[in-house]
Amino acid sequence: MRRKLAAGNWKMNGTSAALSELETLINAHPTADVDILICPPATLIAQAAKTALKSPVQIGGQDCHSAESGAHTGDISAPMLTDAGASHVILGHSERRENHNESSMLIHDKARTAHQSGLITLICLGESLAQREAGSTLDIIADQLANSTPDGATATNTVIAYEPIWAIGTGLIPTLDQIAEVHDFIRSKLETRFGDQTASGIRLLYGGSVKPGNADEIFAVSNVDGALVGGASLKEADFSPIINALEHAV
Ligand code: PEP
C-alpha cells in the first residue's frame, strides 16, 4: 500500500509571520493517516523544521542545485536543505522549467544529488495547454519522466507529481478521465523502467488547482496517491480539508 501524501508548495510566499499558519496546521493534525509536507520558501525552512519537529508535518525545499557545493551564488544545495531540517525537495516545477529554463537533464542531475543527500524528491511533470490541444500530452510526460528521473529512483526516495501547466493557479482542472489517463500512463512507464515492485511503491501526486471543493473527486481517481497543492496550501483553513479528504480516501 502506498501511503498518501498531501504536499503544499508555498512558492515565493511567506515571511516568518506565515509560520503561524504552520503552527495552526500542526495543531489541527496532531496525528495523521497520510504524510503531510509543507515546502516553504528557503528562508523559512530551518524555522519551519523546528516548528514541525515531533509533528506529522514534514518540511521540504522547492529546489536545489545539482552540485553539493561550489561557486553558485544564490543557489541552495541538497546538503544545505537536509542540514536545515528538510526531508523532501520539489524538483522540476513548471515555474522552474519555464522561468529558469530548467531542462529534464538538469532536473535529473538535481534529483541524483538530492537522493545522495537523503532527500525525497518530488519530480514534477506537466504539459502546456498547447501541447494538450495538439494531442501530445503523453509524449511530453513520457519524455519528462524518462529524462528527469534518475536510475537510482526508488519508492522511498521518489514521488512523481503530474501538474498540467494550464491547471496551475488557474482554477481549471483536467477531467477526471484525463487525470486517470496520465497517472495510469506514468505508472506503466515506471513499471517498464523500474520493475513492478519499485513502480508500485512510487507515489503519484496530482497538482493544479486542487481545492477543498474538488479534492474528494480527484483523490478517488485511479493511481492518484495525493496532491501537490499551491495556493490552497497557504492557509490552514484551505489545506486541512484537502488533507482530511485524502485521509478519507485511504
Ligand atoms: C503548484 O504550483 O504546484 C500548484 C499546484 O499550484 P495551485 O495549487 O495553486 O494550482
Image (cartoon, rainbow, N blue to C red):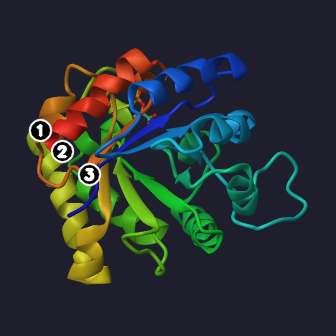
The residue tagged 1 is 176
- Using the rendered view, name the quadrant where residue 228 is placed: top left
Are there few (<14), some (14-19), or many (20+) residues within 10 Å of tag 1? some
SS state under label 3:
helix
Rounded to the nearest angstrom, the CA distance separating label 3 from label 1 is 15 Å
Ligand 1 under 8 Å from disc 3 Cβ: no
SS state under label 2:
helix
Label 2 amino acid?
Ile
Are there few (<14), some (14-19), or many (20+) residues within 10 Å of tag 2? many
Label 3 amino acid?
Thr
| Residue at 37% across, 39% down | 31
View quadrant of ligand 1:
top left
Residue 190 visible in the snapshot:
no
Residue 67 position (above or below residue 207): below
- Using the rendered view, name the quadrant where residue 110 is placed: bottom right
Query: On the picture, is 111 further left or further right than 124?
Result: right
Residue lying furthest right: 71
The residue tagged 2 is 179
Query: On the picture, is 230 further left or further right than 4?
Result: right
The residue tagged 3 is 137
